[in-house]
Amino acid sequence: MSIIDQSELRLASIDDPTAHQLRLLLTLAEELHFGRAARRLYLTQPALSQQIRSLEERLGVSLFHRSSRRVELTAAGRAVLPAARSVVDAADELRNIARRMTSGSERLRLGVCESFTALDSTRTIIAALTELHPDLGPDVRVLDRFSDQLLALQSGEIDAAFAHFPVPDDLHCEPLAVEPRLACIAGSDPLTERSSLELTDLAEHRVISLVSPTFRAGHDFWSVNPRPDGSQVRYAAHAGSSFESLLSTVSLGGTVAFVPAVAADLYPRPDLRYLDVEDLTECTFGIAWHPGNPVPTKLAILHEVVNDYRQGSHARTDAPEQAKVATENT
């Protein structure tokens, strides 16, 4: 039997890509834009570029074609993605198991997008958890995007998240409020002169959405795909890295974003219009968690508080807190 020199083992371990580098690879492969990927990862663009080059050197292949106009995966880049995803998933699962085994006395970690913090349901549930279960928390973590919440839930970084439905099938969800969806278009759009709209009136507008195409059910819902008349949905090239960037893109014209009605109260802008669409269905806001969480005490308490909210005298629609105060004072 041959004996492997310890120095060879050390060298091999140094040259192996890290799970962190593979996570960066997967994010850049999804965004195909160094700036957007860096913002998602809370890195500077030069730091991300350096990590990707280091990964390429370790693997001995070029993973991306780079130019001043675009970033594309090479054939080698596409080939390594499935294995990279497997490694990252395994690392997440290891960390998740370790965290769950020691998290029995930790606070409930709740994820929420920044725009949801003004909603009545969010504030009421967080206040109830804080008052009735101070030992539980909650530890509220504000996340930029819906996709960030899903990733954090599935990796075990958070215990539950406030979210608009649909959510992936492996998550459990409880509805809190139902509200209309509106079409958000540029203020200069000729359609703003119309007294009523149908989806067919928006057929020439490209749809822009924050929900990644990798989550097909969510992407289709917020793109209204399929359309009632069977027409093909046209998509915008840039989905935005935040809700504010989505709105800024819409304000330039030619695109539409289908958004919860609460967005009109939370994000009023003179260069945008939020319009009712007669054949656009409603959306549901609620809370989601992973049913396989092996620390059930937290989720049992959360479920109890959510049920109390749902059975209480709360409005069917989920108005922002400032809007409710304004109504009460009139």
Image (cartoon, rainbow, N blue to C red):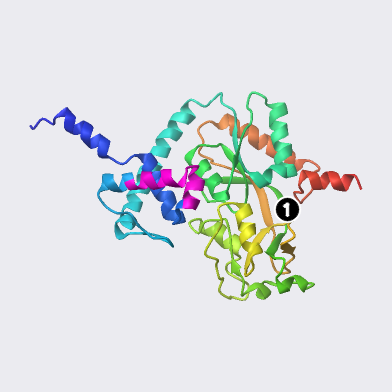
Residue lying at 41% horizontally and 44% vertically, measured from the top left: 23
Counting from the top left corner in percent of width and height, residue 124 is at: 74, 38
Q: Splitting the image into 4 quarters, where does residue 118 fall?
A: top right
Of residues 323 and 226, the one nearer the viewer is: 323
From this viewpoint, is residue 152 visible? yes
Tell me if residue 150 comes above or below residue 182 in the rendering.
above
From this viewpoint, is residue 310 visible? no
Dominant secondary structure (helix, strand or loop) of the stretch shown in magenta: helix
In the rendered structure, the answer to whether residue 257 lies left or right of residue 127 reads left
Counting from the top left corner in percent of width and height, residue 28 is at: 43, 52
Q: Which residues are magenta?
A: 35-53
Counting from the top left corner in percent of width and height, residue 187 is at: 72, 66
Residue lying at 35% horizontally and 52% vertically, measured from the top left: 81
Residue lying at 56% horizontally and 71% vertically, measured from the top left: 233
Residue lying at 25% horizontally and 35% vertically, measured from the top left: 13
Q: Which residue is mark 1?
A: 262
Disc 1 is placed on an element classified as helix
In the rendered structure, the answer to whether residue 211 lies left or right of residue 121 reads left
In the rendered structure, the answer to whether residue 124 lies left or right of residue 215 reads right
Confirm whether the magenta stretch covers residue 42: yes
Tell me if residue 328 comes above or below residue 239 in the rendering.
above
Q: Quadrant of the N terminus?
A: top left
Q: Disc 1 residue type?
A: Val
Counting from the top left corner in percent of width and height, residue 112 is at: 62, 42
**Residue at the extreme right of the image, as rendered:** 330
Of residues 134 and 20, the one nearer the viewer is: 20
